[in-house]
Image (tube, helix red, strand yellow):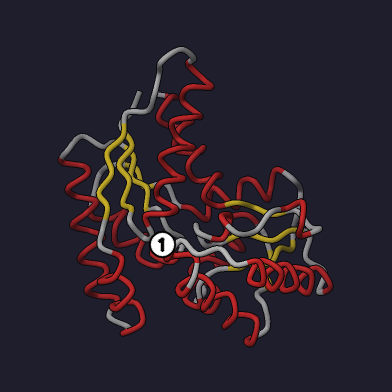
Amino acid sequence: MKTIGMIGGMSWESSLEYYRIINEAVKQSLGGLHSAECILHSLDFARIEQLQHGGDWKALEEILVDSARKLQAAGAGIILICTNTMHLLADAVESAVSARLLHIADAAGEAIAARGMRRVGLLGTRFTMKRGYYSNRLSKRYGVEVIVPVPEDQEVVHRTIYEELCLGVMKGRSREAMNRIIRRLGERGVEGVILGCTELPLLVREAESGIPLFDTTDLHARAAAAIALSG
């Protein structure tokens, strides 16, 4: 079994889900008392958030590269960035280590392609929805057209993530707002919606949304477990 290195803490609420899902997947595969061989480097999200909103992506790149190198030095053969937003820096991290970086958009893209979908919605932070790193990868690698919410809805999603979900706060009215935004994307012809923030699955459920959802936390974590088990 390969060792999984996780760059987490962004936020720790979703990193907790990564740890749970990875270990459950390993146990389901191997049975008994088996669990994953993994290392978690949990960052201080307050510092990360300040740099994100301050636009200092160079400092953020240095933090992530340093984290990946530490995980590799500790024995990690697979690196996970346990957040969608920070995959904006995935190329820099990948080039800094020899360990395999498993990109979260690839985990989503493979699941979307497996269901034969070609047009999907994307929810996430403002950085994920407005910058092209996520949608371009899905378009080029999987032939998927990505639709984002209108600007007003983008702000609702972004604010809910940072002011509520990253603080462990789940509000019923925010769940209703998110479901309305998902339905509006459905009216624009999307076949499914990517929950492109690792905190969103803590709030939104497919049974309530009325449209297929792609939980990137679950997809990314399970893909990592499968690769680790493959040797």
Figure quadrant of the N terminus: top left
62 relative to 41, above or below: below
Q: Residue furthest top?
A: 32
Figure quadrant of the C terminus: top left
Q: Residues within 10 Å of mark 1 (few under 14, many from 20)?
A: many
Q: Amino acid at mark 1?
A: His
Q: Which residue is mark 1?
A: 87
Residue displayed at 32% across by 28% down: 37
Residue nearest the viewer, comparing 13 with 6: 13
151 relative to 100, above or below: below
Residue displayed at 39% across by 24% down: 35
Q: Residue furthest bottom?
A: 152
The number of callouts visible is 1
User: Residue 145: percent from the left, percent from the top?
Assistant: 69, 66
User: Residue 182: percent from the left, percent from the top?
Assistant: 73, 68
User: Residue 56: percent from the left, percent from the top?
Assistant: 27, 80
User: Residue 87: percent from the left, percent from the top?
Assistant: 41, 62
54 vs 141, left or right, is: left
154 vs 212, left or right, is: left
Residue displayed at 20% across by 34% down: 75
Residue displayed at 50% across by 38% down: 223
Q: Secondary structure at mark 1?
A: helix
190 relative to 102, above or below: below
